Image (tube, coloured by chain):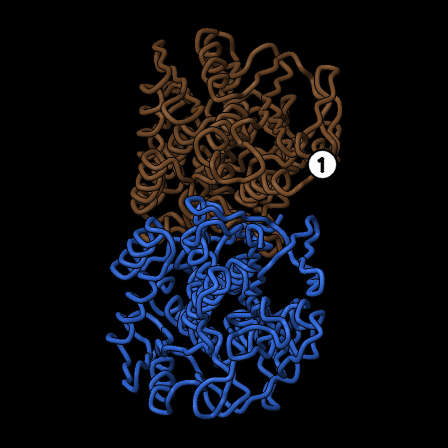
Chain colours: A blue, B brown
Amino acid sequence: MDTPRVVIVGGGFGGLSAAKRLSQIAGVKITLVDKRNYHLFQPLLYQVAMAGLSPAEIAYPLRALLSQDSIEVLLGEVQEVNREERWVQTEANRIPYDFLILACGSTYTYFNAPEWEAVAPALKTLGQATEIRRKVFRAFEEAERTQDPKAHDQFMTFVIVGGGPTGVELAGGLGEITRYNIQRDFDHIRPQEARIILIEGGPVILPSMTPALQAEAVRELNELGVEVRVNAVVTNITKEGITAGGEFISAGTILWAAGVAQGPLNRKLNVELDRQGRVMVTKDLSLPGFPEVFVIGDQAHYKWGAQGAPLPGLAPVAMQQGRFVAKIIRARILGSRAPERFKYIDKGQMATIGRSRAVAMYKGLEFSGFTAWMAWLLVHIYYLIGFKNRVFVLFQWAWTYLTFRRGARLMIEKE
Amino acid sequence: MDTPRVVIVGGGFGGLSAAKRLSQIAGVKITLVDKRNYHLFQPLLYQVAMAGLSPAEIAYPLRALLSQDSIEVLLGEVQEVNREERWVQTEANRIPYDFLILACGSTYTYFNAPEWEAVAPALKTLGQATEIRRKVFRAFEEAERTQDPKAHDQFMTFVIVGGGPTGVELAGGLGEITRYNIQRDFDHIRPQEARIILIEGGPVILPSMTPALQAEAVRELNELGVEVRVNAVVTNITKEGITAGGEFISAGTILWAAGVAQGPLNRKLNVELDRQGRVMVTKDLSLPGFPEVFVIGDQAHYKWGAQGAPLPGLAPVAMQQGRFVAKIIRARILGSRAPERFKYIDKGQMATIGRSRAVAMYKGLEFSGFTAWMAWLLVHIYYLIGFKNRVFVLFQWAWTYLTFRRGARLMIEKE
């Protein structure tokens, strides 16, 4: 064939890993398409929402990341994939491919109640993170200046919906802020008395962890003043508060960390999807009948392990899949033997709860408290893209740790 | 009297200086009201717009700044001042005072064409700075992905309206970015060929500087590829471009750095205003007939010098006035002799153009190039509020200087 053209859709962990690996093959034209101009280090997004970090510390321009490699970067959102003629269409460009890697990630859903979004923002983008930050700090300001005790109590109540890692991190972050960062900043309110409630519809929080670590996480959250409610299904959210498990809670701030879903592209692909809308992929992560089209990361449903459950939406999964797909494409181009089946190397799981508080599991071992927190810190800083960002974030954290001050608690006005 | 109550409206350079000084007097109740929850280091705002710095690096939470002092901070926008009954009214609170300091700063105007704002954003708030950043980097992405040569030329043309320090800094910043930061990031465009045009309606740029420094600024701007047009009055701005000095320029990005104005409060005060809407104050910065009401900083018109021109809207003016007013209030409370007339100590003026490029004047001396730039750097870092921010900004700049990389060039989505 002529110069093979590889198109990668999405500059997250999966797409970036694939791009970096593919750029090592000579004579391949690689185009990376993303609707944003930056790679986002999603695992630390909650830190932006909780005013611990600034957006630029966890996001890096794709062009800067890939400027040394012979990779074309195009801003655009893919709206159509034509597998017969082999091209993708964005709002501005039609891009032909010989190999296609879809790595679009996931989004969130409010199930059948999209109207909840206006009251309870989700945490998936940098814009949403700064919106949550504004909402949280605004609540304290409103509580401070109101003369109505009922309004005071409402503004001082924070509800987080969803007991996965993001929900736990947001709840823990709020516990930290109210107990250790702003407790002396106000004249009329006592932030350390804020009610923080973590609500989970299922029977446990952090369902992918072991029961011992789940219990430990609850204990550490309680220490930070967070109340954990399980088996509490949300039935209504309004400006006044939230109804969960049949009980109404008056709350000024409600944050949404539940309901993973897929963007609109998957439905248009006309392939088998799972209940969450993820694409069912073959054992080499390609689409059935289309060996040149791959789907990786959060967007794919890939069965793994004894129970045949899908791999979770974690950065290590996406990165390993990106490199695997690059290897297959390389083999096909060079005519060598391609690996047949993607094998996941378990990198463990962790969730942070607060300063010196975290839970982690790795190869059957379990950690909690300071050890887990240190491990979490080192792993995240190590993987943070870009040398400068690593140094900045490390410095920022050391500063916050030593002084208990959060510098980024700005409510930047919406324009 | 009972415990004297001082209300300060505005947490900028003037209000903050007054608050800090007043908090040293025992037995005074001080309330600082601001519509934002942070102090903004305005002189570096253009750096946020030009992706050199992050918002949190030039803004600091007011509560954190004042947490050691016995100062009440209230979020709110003052909508009414009742000088007879001595209170101010925000959207949420009525706050009585014995002494009032108005330090609300200035805003911008599009003269008689408010519709220009939608196309040509101004630079006054952090939200606007990130909006400008998004717009600038979006233009390069659009130029990169378009197949239409006319659209390419339009997206590659940037016009800055207003030849004051802000306009010069924006134009110089754009010159820097296109020539030294992103010139190798694209496949289809050459950012270093971007047209950058600085438009000024009057006969010179930087009108408050000397002719020699004005000429030097033009020279340094030209070196960065910026075209300077004077005597070019803007008569129209549309999505397609701008008409100035009778000529139409097709431009994808137009930035507004002209037209200083005042917020709506001044008109409600029922006092004498100058043409820009500033409050005419007496020689001790109080309102005629109301010795307990002071107006300082950008909001005030205070005649000074041989020509009796008003003091310019600079941080040193606001800071000196804040401290002067605090001194008067202290004397009144303690019954000692108050100073009669505000005297301004000239701190000079400077404008930065780019890396190693600036112009400055101080006590009759003139500087340009690297010397002026170093002076500018040191002065700005020295005055930057908060120890951590100083270190961060210094590090950020050293990084950008050494590597020619700008980390903060994110286009964060609007929600």
Left or right: A32 as drawn, with respect to A16: right
| Image coords of residue B160 (percent x, y) | 60, 26
Report crowding for label 1: few under 14, some 14 to 19, many 20 or more residues within 10 A (C-alpha): few
| Image coords of residue A274 (percent x, y) | 62, 82
Instruction: Residue under label 1, please give it.
Output: B148
Residue A211 vertical placement versus A110 (above, below): below
Report the amino acid beneath label 1.
Asp
Quarter of the image holding residue B246?
top right
Q: Nearer the viewer, residue A323 or A256?
A: A323
Q: For mark 1, name the chain.
A: B
Left or right: A9 as drawn, with respect to B115: left
Q: Residue at x 63, y 83 (%)?
A: A275
| Image coords of residue B216 (percent x, y) | 44, 12
Q: Nearer the viewer, residue B271 or A379?
A: A379
Residue A133 in view in this figure? no
Quarter of the image holding residue A290?
bottom right
